[in-house]
Image: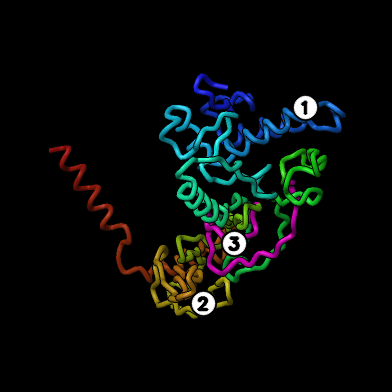
């Protein structure tokens, strides 16, 4: 107990005053196992220690109570906690045993003299208000990897999710009668795997999050959520940018020169694109509405098709002669502009 007469809950759990919630929780569980009555049958000292660490964790394990407690240590007369002679705190605020799944407990009543009626009314009002409050459980993070095709259509998957649920042995109270529950070691919750069906909407991308409300860790009255982060694998043909798709489409020299109707693959089906006569390699065409569905279901992105002219290889002698005969179709030097630019730079240096 500190000099001010206030119990040192940090010392009870063996943690520093700057300990994180996880560090406090870990220390509590370690002590709960150490003081387990099955390991220390008939030990009054362990029973007392068990009550002590439960009391400490009830305050330090709750963010609001911990803040009020810390304030009371520096200013015991101006905090929300009222300090009584036994070193505990009240002020009408209820506290939960273990993780808060068990019976609500309240500080004993005290005689306030002539102001008893006023204080008792305020006390009852505060208790009633606090008792109705719920504490949401923690969210549980999970990850799911999809193909681009699955991201396009949407998919329903079964996932095994591990979360904390009330202990079945003690109903979440952390104790069986006067003894610590041997199943959860007084923690009130246990880790359990549940199989859940997850519906992924069309249009998700890497980094998208799907939330399953109320499927996470149990809390006081309200469970947390399961938050699933999506990862979409790269596609061997299509590249994605937001809701648009990009594809490199090879065409023959004849198709590019004379024009043609070209089949273009998409994630939904095959589209037919008109390739105009004299199409140059690197030209990009847009097929509207052939991209990814938008996440909000308001439409689709576009598909951008970049044409590349495929040059034949391993020609026979006859094919070479045939191609050489086509040289006459070029009415001008295709590199004339490039050569003129280079020639101009060289002459500038010579001058």
* Left or right side of 327 for 159: right
Outermost residue, front direction?
A: 114
Is residue 231 at all visible to an observer of this figure?
Answer: no
Colour scheme in use: rainbow
In the image, is residue 204 part of the stretch drawn in magenta?
Answer: yes
Position in image of residue 1 (x %, y %): 58, 22
Circle 2 residues within 10 Å: few <14, some 14–19, many ≥20: some
Position in image of residue 157 (x %, y %): 69, 64
SS assignment at label 3: loop
Closer to us: 112 or 212: 112
Closer to us: 134 or 312: 134
Depth check, mark 2 against mark 1: the one in front is 1
Residue 259 against residue 162 in the figure, above or below: below
State the residue position of label 3.
213
* Left or right side of 54 for 84: left
Q: Residue 21 carries which label?
A: none
Circle 3 residues within 10 Å: few <14, some 14–19, many ≥20: few
**What whole-number distance in Å separates the C-alpha atoms at marks 3 and 1?**
40 Å
Q: Residue at 79% of width from left, 39% of height from top?
A: 178
Quadrant (top left, top right, bottom left, bottom right) of the C terminus: top left
**What whole-number distance in Å separates the C-alpha atoms at marks 3 and 2?**
47 Å
Position in image of residue 345 (x %, y %): 20, 44
Labels 2 and 1 touching (C-beta < 8 A) = no
Q: Residue at 31% of width from left, 61% of height from top?
A: 333
Q: Residue 262 carries which label?
A: 2
Q: Give the range drawn in magenta.
A: 189-217
Position in image of residue 331 (x %, y %): 31, 69
State the residue position of label 1.
46
The number of numbered discs placed on residues in the rendered structure image is 3
Residue 263 against residue 48 in the figure, above or below: below
SS assignment at label 2: strand
Q: Residue at 45% of width from left, 33% of height from top?
A: 71
């Amino acid at each position: 107990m500190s000099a001010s007469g206030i119990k040192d809950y940090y010392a009870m759990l063996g943690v520093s005053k700057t300990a994180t919630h996880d560090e406090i929780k870990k220390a509590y569980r370690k002590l709960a196992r150490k003081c387990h009555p099955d390991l220390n049958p008939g030990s009054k000292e362990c029973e007392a220690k068990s009550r002590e660490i439960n009391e400490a964790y009830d305050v330090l394990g709750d963010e609001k109570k911990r803040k009020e407690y810390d304030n009371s240590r520096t200013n015991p007369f101006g905090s929300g906690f009222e300090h009584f002679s036994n070193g505990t705190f009240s002020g009408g605020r209820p506290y939960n045993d273990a993780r808060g799944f068990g019976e609500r407990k309240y500080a004993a009543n005290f005689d306030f003299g002539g102001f008893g009626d006023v204080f008792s009314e305020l006390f009852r009002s505060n208790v009633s208000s606090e008792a109705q409050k719920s504490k949401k459980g923690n969210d549980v993070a999970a990850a799911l990897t999809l193909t681009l095709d699955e991201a396009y259509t949407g998919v329903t998957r079964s996932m095994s999710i591990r979360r904390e649920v009330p202990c079945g042995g003690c109903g979440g109270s952390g104790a069986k009668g006067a003894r610590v529950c041997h199943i959860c070691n007084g923690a009130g919750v246990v880790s359990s795997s549940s199989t859940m069906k997850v519906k992924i909407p069309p249009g998700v991308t890497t980094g998208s999050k799907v939330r399953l409300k109320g499927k996470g860790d149990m809390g006081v009255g309200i469970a947390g959520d399961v938050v699933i982060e999506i990862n979409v694998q790269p596609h061997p043909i299509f590249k994605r940018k937001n809701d648009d798709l990009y594809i490199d489409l090879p065409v023959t020299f004849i198709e590019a020169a004379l024009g043609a109707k070209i089949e273009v693959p998409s994630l939904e089906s095959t589209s037919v694109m008109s390739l105009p006569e004299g199409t140059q390699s690197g030209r990009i065409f847009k097929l509207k509405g052939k991209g990814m569905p938008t996440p909000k279901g308001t439409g689709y992105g576009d598909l951008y098709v970049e044409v590349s002219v495929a040059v034949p290889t391993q020609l026979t002698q006859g094919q070479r002669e045939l191609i050489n005969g086509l040289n006459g179709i070029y009415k001008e030097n295709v590199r004339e502009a490039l050569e003129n630019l280079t020639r101009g730079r060289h002459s500038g240096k010579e001058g």
